[in-house]
Structure formats: C-alpha cells, structure tokens
Image: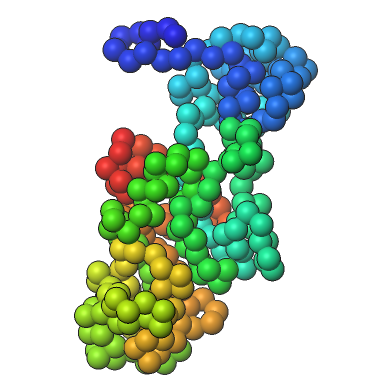
Amino acid sequence: MCRAQGDNIFMASMQLQEILFSQGFGTRRVCAGLIQQGFVAVAEQICRDPATDFIATGLQFSVQGVPWEYFEKAYLMLHKPAGYECSQKPSTYPSIYTLLPGPIRQRGGGAAAGVQAVGRLDQDTTGLLLLSDDGKFIHRMSSPKHHVPKVYQVTAKHAVDDKQVQKLLSGVVLDDDPKPVRAAACEQTGERTLSLTLTEGKYHQVKRMIAAVGNRVEDIGGLHRSRIGNLELPPDLLPGGWRWLTANDLVSISGKA
Ligand code: URA
C-alpha cells in the first residue's frame, strides 16, 4: 500500500499484470504476455515489465491502442436495443452482453466473471439498463425494498383513458399474485401513450398491468425505459451504445458517490 499525495486516502499499488487481469484482459499469463509484447501503455509510455507497480485507482492505460481506466468495480449503462435478450445464455435473440467489449464481460476472471444486468428488460423492450459487478449495488438497485423508481414510456395498442390511468394508480391484480400492484406515478402523454413509474420489477410487469386495465402494449416499440432513480437515459447514447457511470450518475441513482 502506498499513500496518495495530499490526502488521507490509502490507495493500493498493484502490478501492471494484476491490473490488467482484474480488468478482464485474460489470465495473468495472457496479461503478462500483452505487457511484454509492448501492447500496454501507461501515460502514453509503453511498459514492458508486468511487475511494475502502479496506483490502480484512476489509472489510465491503453491496451493495443484502446484507452481504458481502472475501476475496482464496474458500473455502466447500456441503451438496450430491441431484439436482444438480457440473459448470458439467450434462447432466441443475441445477448446484450455481446454489445459490451470483451474485457468488461470477463472482469474478475473467475466463474462468476464480468458484469451482470441490474434486472432484466424483455427482448422487445428498449432503453436504460444498468450493469455492474458489484453484488451489493445490484441487490440494492433491484430489491423492491429499496423502491428505486423506474420510468417506462408505454405505447398502447388502443386509446388510453382516464379510467385506465386511475386503475393503474390505485392498483391492479396480476393473474398469479393476489396482492395488487400499483404504479407509483402514471401520466397520459398522448392518445395511446403513458409515462408509468414502477418501484418493483415483477416479470413482464408493465405489459401485465396494461393488460389488466383492458389495453395492450404495442408489439413493436411499445415499451421503453427512460429513467432509473434520477438517472435519465442520455439522448446521445444511441441504441446498442454503453458508457461508464460517472460518480454523479451513481449519486443520482443511489446516493452512493
Ligand atoms: N415490464 C415489462 O413488461 N417488460 C419489461 O421489459 C420491463 C418491465
């Protein structure tokens, strides 16, 4: 351990090969090979010694010219496109994990390697999906106990009326569950469109709630998640795109810096 200059925080120094290993660049042997072959640069200087120590926190490096930053835990957002499954082993459509760079999928190296989606969206649902390899974060964000609001933009097949909106707010019974579920907020935004806020995530919940009030979510483009907590899907993050969450993003969704 070495002490960061000018503050009180102890930051671990790590060998470069360990840094690459922790960030998903392959086995320790593969990482050492990448370094020895001159594929890895730190501060734009090629480093060929796998045992060189660096303070990992915030380290910027590049592997084969691609810039990376060290993160002890990974937190990212993906703009999920339609036609992708949120499973690691999809049955019909490609997996959302194929949209991420290999190292992010392989972080940690072990059997439970890589990031996991925080909850799932249906194959045909688009929008904001969070991924992380921080188990506590995943639990906190997906547990109904924590009431993290998720906002969905719904396009229904048939015209929406005030009665449907009122039912969604007061609670509807879903077939397999006697306890009514209600929307935390529901606003009609157009003849067939709604903005619906939920604080739990039951299987196909939006589609089943809309069906329970006598309407149906449109098959194509009918469901889009636009916000989790206070974190909006950025308009410049195109379908299929991902980016790291910033410290501000983490504060806005979970209060964690
Ligand atoms: N509710 C649904 O019905 N589907 C989703 O993908 C998300 C919420």
**Residue 96 point in image, percent of width and height:** 60, 56
Q: Residue placed at 67% from the left, 13% from the top?
A: 50
Q: Is residue 173 visible?
A: yes
Q: Residue at x 49, y 30 (%)?
A: 71
Q: Would residue 16 appear left or right of 166 to someone viewing this image? A: right
Is 53 drawn above or below residue 24 in the view shown? above
Q: Is residue 183 left or right of residue 138?
A: left
Q: Position of residue 124 (x, y in %)?
A: 56, 72
Examine the image and state in which quarter residue 164 appears. bottom left
> On screen, 43 above or below 153?
above
Which percent across, then down, holds residue 195?
A: 33, 73
Nearer the observer, 135 or 129: 135
Q: Is residue 200 above or below residue 2?
A: below
Which quadrant would the N terminus be assigned to in this image?
top left
Looking at the picture, the colour scheme in use is rainbow
Q: Residue at x 45, y 82 (%)?
A: 217
Q: Would residue 34 be seen by someone viewing this image from the given angle? A: no
- As rendered, which of 147 and 69 lies closer to the eye? 147
Quarter of the image containing the C terminus? top left
Q: Quadrant of residue 65?
A: top right
Give the side of residue 62 with respect to residue 48, left or right.
left
Q: Locate residue 53: give its quadrant.
A: top right
Q: Nearer the viewer, residue 24 or 156?
A: 24
Q: Please provide percent x and percent y for residue 94.
A: 68, 61
Report the residue at 46% width, 52% height from top: 118
- Tally of marks: 0
Residue 46, compared with residue 117, is above or below; it is above
